[in-house]
Image (cartoon, rainbow, N blue to C red):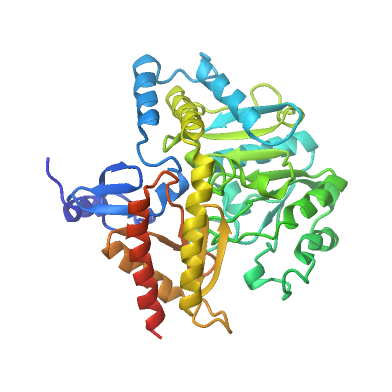
Amino acid sequence: MTHSNSTLSARRDAAVPRGVFTLQDVFALRALGGVVLDVEGREYIDFTGGIGACNVGHSHPRVTQAVSRQCQELMHTCFHIFQYEGYVALAERLCKLVPGDGPKKAALFNSGAEAVENAVKIARCATGRHAIIAFEDNFHGRTNMTLGLSGKVHPLKKGFGPYAPEVYRMPYAYCYRCPMGLDYPSCDVACADHLRDFFRTHVDPEAVACLVAEPVTGLGGVVTPPPEYFPRLAGICREHGILMLMDEIQTGMGRTGAMLACEHWGFTPDIITLAKSLAGGMVLSAVVGRADVMDAVEPGGLGSTFGGNPVSCAAALAVLEVFEAEDILAQAERLGRKVKKQFESWAGELEIIGEVRGKGAMLGLELVEDRESRTPAVEKAQAVVKECLANGVVVLAQGRYGNVIRTLIPLTMTDDVLERGLEVLGASLRNADGAR
């Protein structure tokens, strides 16, 4: 049956609630690598990577073949009824993948939000404490607990409260818009030391189970803290027996040029959550942490009917094979350097670009009306997104004000496709810069 975007949009409007956001009225038919083809045969260069879920590219052959083989053998039993090797094999691989010298264990779930929620449960059980410290400009999911942890109201949290109690949120290391009005590096990362004052004014440290954070913010606009920030926080947390929970759902699986972003800063979290690109687009998430912390929960306390599904585990194991066979981390570093060099070149040319930031291939452009006032250029950011879409390139405008162009380019994207995409993005930025 032949479909058009308009006929499918009409059907969507009649059957799907308006709260389900879509960037554009375009329906995908197939995708490969860094390119998506819609139902009318139009090609789109994907700079969003399925919102960070396609680090090894769309429909990587190794992943699709692993999925096909597994579907023919075993699609589902529920690991709690009939166990299967894929779950155990993947848990073993993840325990070796995350930093830290001591023994580790991993539990598998479905979505990133589910992983974060279970990680919080584990931290509370392991410490016997209930309070959680989270950060402004961080995003952790759309369940009640994870929305409570997240720091953006509209449209994510509007109308959905009340949220789970005992969540305390403090300012993040957003250096471009420092919440303390200081300049890096003369500030000596005072925002990290602010945690000590936070214990005096917001929550007793002996009541805090864990501190949860994104190493680099995703939806929050690629806010990238100084290198001293997390080691300083980790030291304070250790003093008070507080667990460090790193949400690597978007930053993990090579996105920042290391397998996990926390590796850049030389500290070892107690618990790490993974999802998105873990299984190359299949539904899967994981909580990986110190064995003593993970084992604090009694049998039956953790579970999921579909968590660690055999097909998803097969996909994830194939993704890890791709990382080794194709040296994806080196590709991430190379792609990140290339894109960042282009971004910095534009920043030298265009007044609309207030800051270029990020790690590896997780990069953002904060757009401003002028560099002196740093007024967020929200409408211009939306114009860039719209113009890029009209010219076959998909980008996102996010951040606290919706003025940060965020790129999550598949790490396997070919140079010619990347350059075509950057050409479109650059032209759109120049047009927005000229509209003063």
In the displayed structure, does residue 189 sit left or right of residue 120? Answer: right
In the displayed structure, does residue 1 sit left or right of residue 109? Answer: left
Q: In the displayed image of the protein, which residue is found farthest to the left?
A: 1
The image quarter in which residue 190 lies: bottom right
**Front residue of this view, candidates 416 and 398:** 416
**Front residue of this view, candidates 374 and 227:** 227
**Front residue of this view, candidates 316 and 22:** 316
Where does residue 141 sit, x and y in percent of width and height? 54, 48
Say which residue appears at 56% left-offset and 59% top-offset: 222
In the displayed structure, does residue 17 sit left or right of residue 217? Answer: left
In this view of the protein, can residue 158 be seen by the observer?
no
The image quarter in which residue 66 lies: top left
Say which residue appears at 51% left-offset and 76% top-offset: 376
Where does residue 150 sit, x and y in percent of width and height? 59, 55
**Front residue of this view, candidates 35 and 283:** 35
In the displayed structure, does residue 67 sit left or right of residue 328? Answer: left
Where does residue 205 sit, x and y in percent of width and height? 84, 51
Query: Quadrant of the image for the C terminus?
Result: bottom left
In this view of the protein, can residue 239 be seen by the observer?
yes
Circle count:
0
Query: Quadrant of the image for the N terminus?
Result: top left
Say which residue appears at 49% left-offset and 44% top-offset: 331
Where does residue 122 sit, x and y in percent of width and height? 69, 35
